[in-house]
Image (tube, coloured by chain):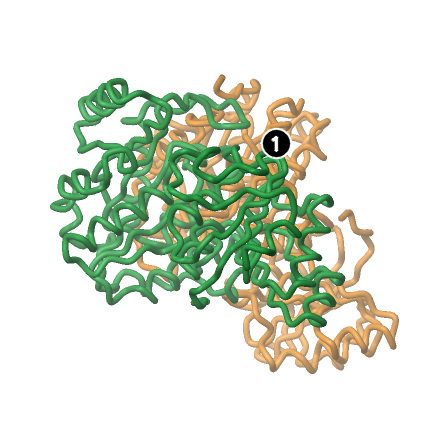
Chain colours: A orange, B green
């Protein structure tokens, strides 16, 4: 599923660019090699990306409509918001149809596949547009256990909830590993990560019987690297999405885990389930790994977004003390210190039970 | 997805009726209200069901071909074998096509949907046959948490591996509960269970993001009963299928679990992963429940198939002693003793964490 680079995105995020619902938009702006030339959100029209989302280092203009984005010469439209359930809000249809009419490639991470929409498909046929539904699952494939022979060390980010920074931690640690000289790769498992990396496996969209097999195939394909950082999904204590988390955990068969937690998140978002204490959560992840192929949590990527620097330092120190593990905020402080602290724990491959 | 009763099955199990691969055939013969009038397996042609699979109390003849089954007046053909991966072996096509030509309903639990096969669909259109792919998943639906308000007590069978007797335990315990006067229902989550019950949710075929939501919907639909026995799938320590297990565990939000184990099974079948000791397995299941909505293992349904009576008694006593839990073989000894021993533990609904 490797895709060419060189996209110039207009990003569709109507009414949502400033919200966490626009995490696909934010992720692509922050991490993709593809350029973003404009964002479509009437609510902030006339401003620039970094005025609205300060941590994104981008001057790209925000405009009110697809028509206003076209003068910035995009060659692709990215659906930049992930609504719960992944269906297409009807009000977005006009912009997508216009983009197709203008010959732009459409890149979408919705569960509802745009290429299956008769009107979009017909429009794309007329204009020559391509529609890339990044959540298209791979062909069904059962898990085989071949993963246990992979050469690369496999590191999986796991979380205390959805949307806490698992993808970002994997991307930042990949960067750190490369800068330390390792042949490190990021393996994407969600729509934003796939849009950023240009390929991957949309784990949440796989048929549950084949979830671990799809992840195994993804990791095998990267197996000649030194170290693979696999983007985690959901959380093992998430009432709705833990099946995705566990299929990913057993399919990737990691040698080490990195736990990602957002300071201040005390309940599973949208469900109210109180989060377990981190040490208990670590026990559960490690107990599941120990049932198949042992892996330990090597460190904590603590997301201290929203805290001031002093409070962030305190939270990091407290979490390190509570868990006895290396801990840092890899966005605020860069990934190198945490990577260096964890690297000895990434050094060995673990073996499956036998 | 409730289906009418009154089927008279010819069951297709070529070369496999005596094997555990024919578990759909065996399950339907043992538990469905639908009748089985013939089994198709050339290897045992001329014998009767109970001659080949002694625990099945059925005189139905085994024949060599669909043509030889027709004189027994079937009105439906059941695909009675579940090959790994669920694809249709090409050699079965002739029998299915002949059955369609003869106007039989086709009932199949394969992952590969027979109704999507152009030749079968065309044949069915000509003959008026219906094709029921029991593994057709429900419309995608996210888990909402409504399950936490369901009236019924929910009991889920969980296993130490696939194919150890989780469906059978749920069916037998449902029977015991009814005979004790409870409004008890069996909820099917796999192809055999669905064929037996005439409806259910093929959990392994759901999209992973929606697995827990599909199970929640199934349980909500049965929610007015006193007690629901939900058929478990896979095992939490299964390298390939644990995602299905966990999606089912959180989606059903059980009040109690029944652990099912096959005596002598020491490794995950087909993968070689050693099984955890039962007490450790119980800890993992309970730890996951405790992260969302507490539930305890109320007892052990020990499958002592293949042991003589003395060895079975010893295995049951030993497992009860090791785990401190009620334990019995619900097939060999009937489900009533185990049901009665566990019933006090089924009495209360547990509450989700809050």
Residue that mark 1 sits on: A144
Number of numbered discs present? 1
Above or below B202: residue B222:
below
Q: At 64% across and 61% down in the image, what residue appears?
A: A109
Residue B337, horizontal then vertical, whole percent:
16, 38
Horizontal side of A72 relative to B316 (left or right) equals right
Residue A175, horizontal then vertical, whole percent:
65, 37
**What is the chain identity of the residue bearing mark 1?**
A
Q: At 33% across and 35% down in the image, what residue appears?
A: B260
Of residue A300 and residue A117, the one placed in the foreground of this image is A117
Can residue A138 be seen in this snapshot?
yes
Residue A321, horizontal then vertical, whole percent:
33, 30
Above or below A130: residue B32:
above
Horizontal side of B296 relative to B100 (left or right) equals left
Does dot 1 land on a helix, a strand or a loop?
A: loop
Of residue B68 and residue B317, the one placed in the foreground of this image is B68
Residue A20, horizontal then vertical, whole percent:
50, 62
Can residue A54 be seen in this snapshot?
no
Q: At 50% across and 28% down in the image, what residue appears?
A: B269
Q: Residues within 10 Å of mark 1 (few under 14, many from 20)?
A: some
Q: Quadrant of residue A153?
A: top right
Q: At 35% across and 38% down in the image, what residue appears?
A: A281
Above or below A130: residue A69:
below
Horizontal side of A305 relative to A180 (left or right) equals left
Q: Quadrant of residue A324?
A: top left
């Amino acid at each position: 599923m490797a895709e060419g680079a060189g996209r110039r995105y207009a990003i569709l995020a109507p009414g949502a660019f400033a919200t966490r619902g626009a995490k696909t938009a934010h992720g692509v702006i922050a991490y993709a090699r593809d350029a973003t030339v404009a964002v479509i959100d009437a609510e902030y029209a006339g401003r620039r990306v970094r005025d609205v989302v300060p941590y994104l280092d981008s001057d790209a203009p925000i405009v009110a409509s697809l028509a206003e984005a076209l003068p910035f010469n995009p060659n692709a439209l990215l659906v930049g918001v992930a609504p719960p359930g992944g269906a297409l809000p009807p009000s977005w249809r006009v912009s997508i149809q216009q983009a197709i009419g203008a010959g732009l490639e459409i890149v979408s991470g919705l569960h509802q596949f745009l290429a299956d929409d008769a009107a979009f498909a017909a429009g794309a046929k007329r204009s020559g547009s391509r529609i890339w539904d990044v959540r298209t699952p791979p062909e069904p494939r059962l898990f085989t256990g071949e993963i246990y022979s992979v050469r690369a060390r496999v590191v999986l980010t796991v979380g205390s909830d959805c949307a806490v920074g698992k993808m970002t931690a994997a991307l930042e640690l990949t960067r750190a590993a490369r800068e330390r000289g390792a042949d490190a790769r990021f393996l994407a498992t969600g729509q934003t990560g796939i849009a950023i990396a240009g390929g991957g496996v949309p784990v949440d969209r796989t048929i549950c019987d084949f979830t671990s097999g799809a992840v195994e195939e993804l990791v095998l394909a990267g197996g000649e690297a030194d170290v693979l950082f696999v983007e985690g999904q959901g959380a093992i204590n998430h009432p709705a999405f833990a099946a995705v988390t566990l299929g990913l955990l057993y399919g990737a068969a990691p040698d080490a885990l990195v736990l990602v937690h957002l300071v201040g998140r005390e309940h599973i978002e949208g469900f109210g389930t109180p989060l377990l204490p981190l040490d208990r959560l670590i026990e559960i992840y490690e107990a599941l790994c120990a049932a198949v192929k042992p892996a330990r949590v090597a460190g904590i990527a603590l997301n201290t977004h929203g805290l001031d620097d002093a409070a962030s330092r305190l939270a990091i120190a407290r979490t390190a003390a509570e868990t006895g593990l290396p801990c840092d905020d890899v966005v605020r402080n860069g990934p190198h210190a945490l990577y260096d602290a964890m690297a000895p724990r990434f050094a060995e491959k673990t073996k499956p039970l036998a």
